[in-house]
Image (tube, rainbow, N blue to C red):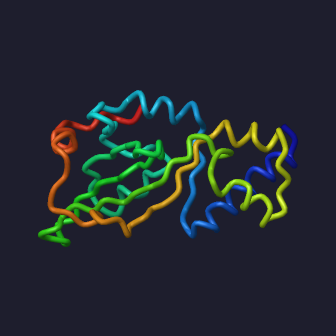
């Protein structure tokens, strides 16, 4: 990979975040796969005690109860970080949603972001993007952003001692 390929990859990631008006995190695909392996399977949802390292700053804002990685009926992935903030009583749980692009080049916005930002669709760009999973958010305008309940799996996980980061 040459510097121009890296620059184009970074330009695309920045442009996609700008288009969504959200923060965007590029997670190496290997780290994402390792993160998924640590999840507790709860039906169509994987549950975790803590968010991936790229989202660690959310823990500074409120106590993280857990994280859910789910897939909807259209095979779209989302990562919900559930935090507890007693100042929001009686709706003490906040759910922030992050969209997950496991294959960034297959994103619906891919061609438009390229053309609007003068980025050439090259095999090198696609190869670099495919080495990452893009996480975009947070989306706080979801119906259950403030809630008084969380899933039983997250409640059970929040009561378990946290494992030290490894």
Reply above or below: 18 against 98.
below
Q: Quadrant of the C terminus?
A: top left
- Camera-nearest residue between 74 and 105: 74
The residue under the point 50% across, 30% down is: 33
Q: Residue furthest front?
A: 73
The residue under the point 45% across, 62% down is: 138
Q: 5 left or right of 152?
A: right
Q: How many marks?
A: 0
Horizontal and vertical percent for residue 17? 61, 62
Horizontal and vertical percent for residue 42? 26, 34
The residue under the point 56% across, 46% down is: 101
Q: Quadrant of the N terminus?
A: top right
Horizontal and vertical percent for residue 128? 74, 40
The residue under the point 51% across, 48% down is: 100
Q: 12 left or right of 76?
A: right
Reply above or below: 88 against 166.
below
Q: 127 left or right of 44?
A: right
Q: 32 left or right of 4?
A: left
- Camera-nearest residue between 138 and 31: 138
- Camera-nearest residue between 111 and 33: 111
Reply above or below: 88 against 125.
below
Reply above or below: 165 against 114.
above
């Amino acid at each position: 990979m040459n510097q121009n390929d890296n620059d184009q990859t970074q330009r695309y990631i920045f442009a996609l975040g700008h288009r969504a008006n959200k923060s965007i995190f590029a997670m190496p695909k290997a780290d994402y796969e390792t993160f998924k392996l640590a999840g507790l399977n709860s039906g169509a949802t994987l549950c975790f005690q803590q968010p991936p390292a790229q989202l660690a700053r959310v823990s500074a804002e409120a106590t993280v109860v857990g994280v859910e990685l789910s897939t909807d009926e259209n095979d779209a992935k989302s990562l919900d970080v559930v935090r507890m903030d007693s100042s929001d009583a009686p709706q003490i749980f906040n759910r922030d949603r992050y969209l997950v692009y496991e294959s960034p080049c297959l994103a619906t916005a891919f061609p438009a972001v390229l053309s609007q930002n003068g980025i050439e669709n090259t095999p090198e760009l696609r190869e670099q993007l495919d080495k990452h999973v893009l996480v975009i958010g947070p989306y706080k305008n979801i119906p259950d952003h403030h809630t008084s309940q969380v899933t039983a799996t997250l409640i059970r996980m929040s009561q378990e001692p946290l494992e030290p980061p490894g």
